Amino acid sequence: MLRYLTSGESHGKSLISILDGIPAHLKLSCNDINSELSRRQTGYGRGGRMTIEKDRVEIIAGVRHGESLGSPVTLLIKNLDWENWKRIMAVDEGASGEHHKNVAMPRPGHADLPGGLKYDEKDMRNILERASARETASRVAVGAVCKRFLSEFGIRVLSWVVEIGGIRWKIEDGFLSGGYKDLFNRAEGSEVRCPDSGAEVKMKEKIDEAHDKGDSVGGIFEVVVTGLPPGLGSHVHWDKKLNARLACGLMSIQAIKGVEIGMGFEVARNFGSDVHDEIFYGNLKSDDSAAAEPKIEQWPLKTGFYRKTNNAGGIEGGMTNGEPIVLRAAMKPIPTLMIPLKSVNVCTKKPFDAVKERSDVCAVPAASVVGEAVTAFEIAKVFLEKFGGDSMNEVKRNYRGYLEYLSNW
Ligand code: EPS
């Protein structure tokens, strides 16, 4: 079973993740992970912290001579800001000096108050340090290994931003003719990860407006997985349903408040005949609709069944149906505001303004990269459940056998 743990505080010494269950002989280098870490650090609207951190991974265990060993893969990312915080965040008792940077005024929308009540912490720095989205660097490192694994089977996980602060861009508005890869390439060249440069300008204006007001903005990103076989996940039990597992992964990202799959909430507003994707059989269609991402030559997915629409977002009955998976996640505006909201000092119980911490105005582009990572983990996990083996060759044999079976079904 593929599983992972992350550990580390935002201003602590470093972040550590342990990923267990990667088969032996997966080619893996620090560069595979560092390129993903850099992608997460970009984006218009980030705060001062991103000028301090230059996230780089050190592979501590689980890899030898450029290949996985089948043992847990341990990944370490240093927090460069630790140098400025080592007294405040010191491990030793009484070593932090007089300046503790205590947090007594909880921020509405943050983990501060519920965490303080739950863990009996009047200094809510002890909550916010771990609640911080700094932890998502660990998840991107784990996701990068999962992406490396999936790429061996022609499976790609892509993302872009579709909305920031109420400024929307929809796939239907254009650009799909070049396929998902083209959308992704456009997003990679955009400071807000939006494939449409017109919408990008307006999104940046919205972020500037929030910045000037001391406010923050949220938004929506979309994650697409291509190259999938049908039959990952299952209808037989709640915890085997892939849609549920993907939703859980996305909802576990800091500040995510909602997830949609395919047509999402719109399914509830339409007739069944407008929602369900009709089934066709024959050669793969050659039009440019949502499912038209070319299949990878090395792993030909030939069932003969296809759809002309993908309102289901690639999942029916908790299983992949062979079309691309399409997910969207909504991120709330970051709760740290420079014009703080009303709060209460938890020690004196007197009204106060919420604490002001250095923070981001908008982190939706970064969240989109994190969305890819958690999706890659869930897909790699479900893939290994079906085709699992101790070595890459064994997994490939299993997958090849399944594809052969499918082509004769
Ligand atoms: C975060 C607050 C900010 C962000 C941070 C998440 O950090 P700081 O308090 O040090 O300014 O920059 O994000 C990261 C450090 C990161 O690597 O993404 C928060 O409170 O969630």
Image (cartoon, rainbow, N blue to C red):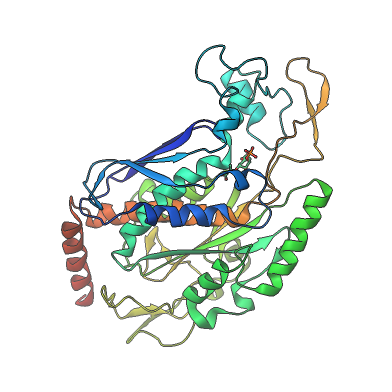
User: Which residue is at the far front?
Assistant: 83
Q: Is residue 367 left or right of residue 408?
A: right
| Quarter in which the N terminus is drawn | top left
Quadrant housing residue 83: top right
Q: Which of 111 and 29 is in front in this view?
A: 29
| Quarter in which the C terminus is drawn | bottom left
Q: In this view, does 362 lie to the left or right of 392?
A: right
Quadrant housing residue 3: top left
Q: Which of 230 and 211 is in front in this view?
A: 211
Q: Where is residue 403 in the image (x, y as percent from the top left)?
A: 22, 70
Q: Position of residue 61 (x, y in %)?
A: 29, 40
Relative to 160, say whether 129 is above or below.
above
Relative to 392, say whether 21 is above or below.
above
Q: Where is residue 339 in the image (x, y as percent from the top left)?
A: 82, 40
Q: In this view, does 349 lie to the left or right of 387?
A: right
Residue at 63% from the left image edge and 33% from the top image edge: 111
